[in-house]
Amino acid sequence: MKLNQIIAERKNKTVYRDGEVCFKVFDRTYSKADILNEALNQARIEETGLNIPKILGVHMVEGKWAIELEYVEGKTLAQLMAENPDKKEEYLNLLVDLQLEVHKKTCPSLNKLKDKMNRKISETTLDATTRYELHTRLEGMPKHNKVCHGDFNPSNIIITEDGTPYIIDWAHATQGNASADAARTYLLFCLSGDEETAKAYLDLFCKKSDTAQQYVQKWMPIVAASQSVKGNAEEREFLLSWTDVVEYE
């Protein structure tokens, strides 16, 4: 195991390449349970037949937990969008098509999205009245069992040289309502400051999935609240500004 070639760095984790495999090494601040749950999610998603890097093992590296995965050579969809702005529409179409492929799958062993969101809403700094309204809205939303990625964005899609797409980072995968997953992707674009792409994405998702935009928008306060528990202060402030459940009525 050689950890000298860094291929990605994110908050509290670093991904190294070692030949045909890569190691996702987590900081000591990560809980063992969260890391093992991510590995389990990845293994479960493999069984759905989606095109993802296969998990090869879980290890301890210099006192830190690490997940070993197949290495996939290629560029992220985010990189391709930045390098080829003239192909933005083509790449957005691919993003939505891949997300809809994910939503066609079921995986009964995954955690339920509603359970996770109820727990996260309870952990927010929102006042009791707002939390009650969010819990009530969440309870009233239709119950589905579709695979939801939970962090579906262009940086989590790798395109190989021959054009094959791989979807990575299944740490937040759940089973539930696809429109909640779409609301999360929309908010991720907004968080990056790209509201134009966020709108274009939402238009495409709703058109291709035959979903009313108002329905996805009803999820946005719920999703924003549940995501506000993590992240930096600036992100929390932005997400909490979306939690007014009256705004989209």
Image (tube, rainbow, N blue to C red):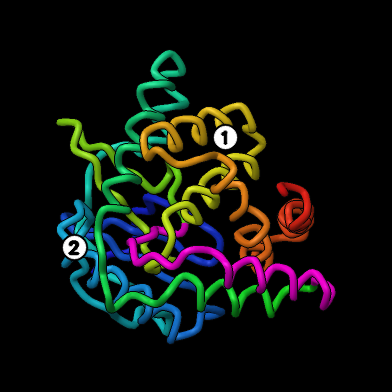
Residue visible at 55% across and 39% down in the picture? 213
Is residue 149 a member of the stretch shown in magenta? Answer: yes
Residue visible at 43% across and 86% down in the picture? 33
Q: Residue 48 has which mark?
A: 2
Q: Position of residue 79 (x, y in %)?
A: 42, 33
Quadrant position of the N terminus in the picture: bottom left
Q: Residue 198 has which mark?
A: 1
Kind of residue sitting beneath label 1: Ala
Q: Nearer the viewer, residue 27 or 79?
A: 79
Kind of residue sitting beneath label 2: Thr
Q: Position of residue 161 (x, y in %)?
A: 19, 31
Residue 57: quadrant of the picture: bottom left
Q: Position of residue 244 (x, y in %)?
A: 78, 56
> Is 210 placed above or below 243 here?
above
Provide the residue span drawn in magenta: 126-150
> Is 18 placed above or below 112 here?
above
